[in-house]
Amino acid sequence: MSDRETLRLDFLKAAGLADAVRAPLPGDASTRRYERLTPANGPTLMLMDQAPAAESQPCDPSWTPEQRHAAGWNAVARLSAGRIEAFAAVAAHLKSLGLSAPEIPSLDAANGLAVLEDFGDALFARVIEDGADETPLYLAAIEALAVLHDAGTPPQTLHGPGGDWPLLTYDETALQGGADLFVDWLPKLDDRVSFDAAAVADWREAWAPIVASGAAGASVMAHRDYHAENLIWLPERDGPARVGMIDFQDAVRAHPSWDLHSLLQDARRDVSPALEAEALDRYFALRPRVDREAFMADYAGLAGLNEARIIGIFARLIARDGKPRYRQFLPRMWRHLNANLEQPALAPVARWFDRHVPAEVRA
């Protein structure tokens, strides 16, 4: 028996779940693992297991950009390294706003273990695949975002059962670092492209206005991975609380467009232009004081940056990590990126792509 399994068994025993039936859930692109727990009595629960040693350190709020780059990717991108205390603190903040994050009946932050409320398997993506009308689900997700955004600028420190956690800003270093994954990793996947130092410098210059605008507009809590595979339909609840949120441990203070384009320009499923337009109309109806024209310029720019970032992540997962299933998502991300490159806010970036990335690669 591994040391990690011994920790899990001891934790479950202390939580009164030693006799629960354990069923592992399929893994994802992270170092976390989940199990569904079925106790002898009471509802099912989830075991969240994130060994702290499995990731590099999260970002210290005091670090300079140079220190962040030296510390590793989690520090550059302001990722939480999956820390349980981050999940618990963000969950507490979401619940304080009347939104649905899992309850956490048992927690061992030091060892990266938590027992969570089980929201079930009704992921938006699966419910829609099974025939549900997608529009009410997406509009409910928009309503939940409006609640989150109308709460205003979140506190710099979140308080949760695992202790305090800093809510960092998705700043220039994080945004540009994400964009740079594209130039770092696409050539390792596709030998039709290569980017020399001059091309990389031009890449960063082209993105600079969008990066600056995204950092300057960082005014709300962003879930940061808000899409149909991370939202669970809870129809027995009311209003925005019908949207069960998971996988939010990497939340940051970010531009309010971030979660919107993550939801509406999804890497994993198609969202029709008509539904995207209807969802955006609902968002602006719920937040009438927002300058729609200025917001949508940022939306296009940051969506394009996020799509370049995700293409880089998928290239890394395929080329470095041997996970070819991510190749199926690349055509959709290219479609999203190509559409955003037609927007005025991305004109310098579009010119860079015309010079450095052949059209046959962007398909």
Image (cartoon, rainbow, N blue to C red):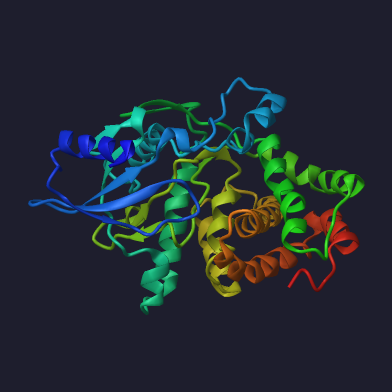
Count the labels in the image: 0
Q: Is residue 325 left or right of residue 158?
A: right
Q: Position of residue 279 (x, y in %)?
A: 52, 64
Considering every residue shown, the one lying at the far bottom of the view is 131
- Image quarter (top left, top right, bottom left or bottom right) of the N terminus: top left
332 in relation to 182, above or below: below
Q: Position of residue 104 (x, y in %)?
A: 27, 39
Considering every residue shown, the one lying at the far top of the view is 62
Residue 3, picture quadrant: top left
Q: Is residue 176 left or right of residue 198?
A: left
Q: Position of residue 204 (x, y in %)?
A: 82, 44
Considering every residue shown, the one lying at the far front of the view is 1
Q: Residue at x 19, y 54 (%)?
A: 44
Q: Position of residue 306 (x, y in %)?
A: 65, 53
166 in relation to 284, above or below: above
Q: Is residue 106 left or right of residue 328?
A: left
Residue 284 appears in the figure: no
Q: Residue at x 28, y 35 (%)?
A: 7
Q: Is residue 156 left or right of residue 131?
A: right
Quick one: 151 or 343, which is closer to the camera? 343
Residue 98, picture quadrant: top left
Residue 342 appears in the figure: yes
Quick one: 167 or 22, which is closer to the camera? 22
Q: Residue at x 42, y 52 (%)?
A: 144
Q: Residue at x 75, y 49 (%)?
A: 184
- Image quarter (top left, top right, bottom left or bottom right) of the C terminus: bottom right
